[in-house]
Image (cartoon, grey):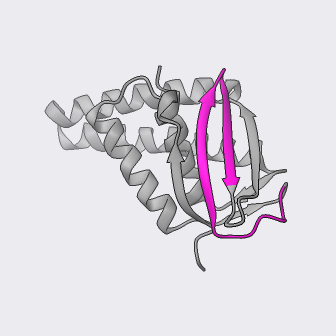
Amino acid sequence: MNPTITNVTLDDASITRRSAEVEHERRVALVDLVHSNEVSLLAAPSLTAPLDLFISVRDNRLTLRFTDTHAASHDITLALHPFRGTIKDYFLMCENYYEAIKHAPGDRLQTLDMARRSVHNEGSELLQAQLKDTLQMDFATARRLFTLICVLHIK
């Protein structure tokens, strides 16, 4: 199956700071999302793939702007308040994980990585649930989008 989304751009104005770890996560998520995604726009079936995706966060709202090759576009806007706790937990788990990489024994690092992934999965599942009426996506795509939302949500 060919990817539906072939180009992703983040609204850099939404980002206030980036650590080396966050920048790495952003790059990996962008590359992975462009190379492999399964997306179906339920709210805009007239848009034809391939699609460009522009992601921004403003006023605690996420906007996903999909644009097709004919310059037709459709915005999906989503309140981020349901994600607040999950994003906060994910940032905390990431900080602990990246700190543990420097000093912790392997079993501690593995435990933190599993916890970090679990919180990330929760955020991805929440994203799928919040978008179920407008955008269907596979779980891997939801995980990559959740990573990018976190990158844009850093304040």
Indicate the quadrant containing the N terminus: top left, top right, bottom left or bottom right.
bottom right
- For the point 37% across and 49% down, the residue is 27
Instruction: Decide if residue 38 is on the left or right side of residue 8.
Output: right
Q: Does the magenta run of residues contain 43?
A: no
- For the point 56% across and 48% down, the residue is 145
Residue 29 in picture, x, y percent from top left: 44, 52
Instruction: Decide if residue 102 is on the left or right side of residue 117.
Output: left
- For the point 83% across and 58% down, the residue is 44
Residue 120 in picture, x, y percent from top left: 51, 42
Up-down relation of residue 85 to residue 143 (above or below): above
Q: Nearer the viewer, residue 30 or 128?
A: 30
Up-down relation of residue 38 to residue 133 (above or below): below
- The single residue placed furthest to the bottom in the displayed view is 1
Up-down relation of residue 58 to residue 131 (above or below): above
Instruction: Decide if residue 114 is on the left or right side of residue 143.
Output: left
Find residue 86 and report its image quarter.
top right
- For the point 40% across and 30% down, the residue is 93
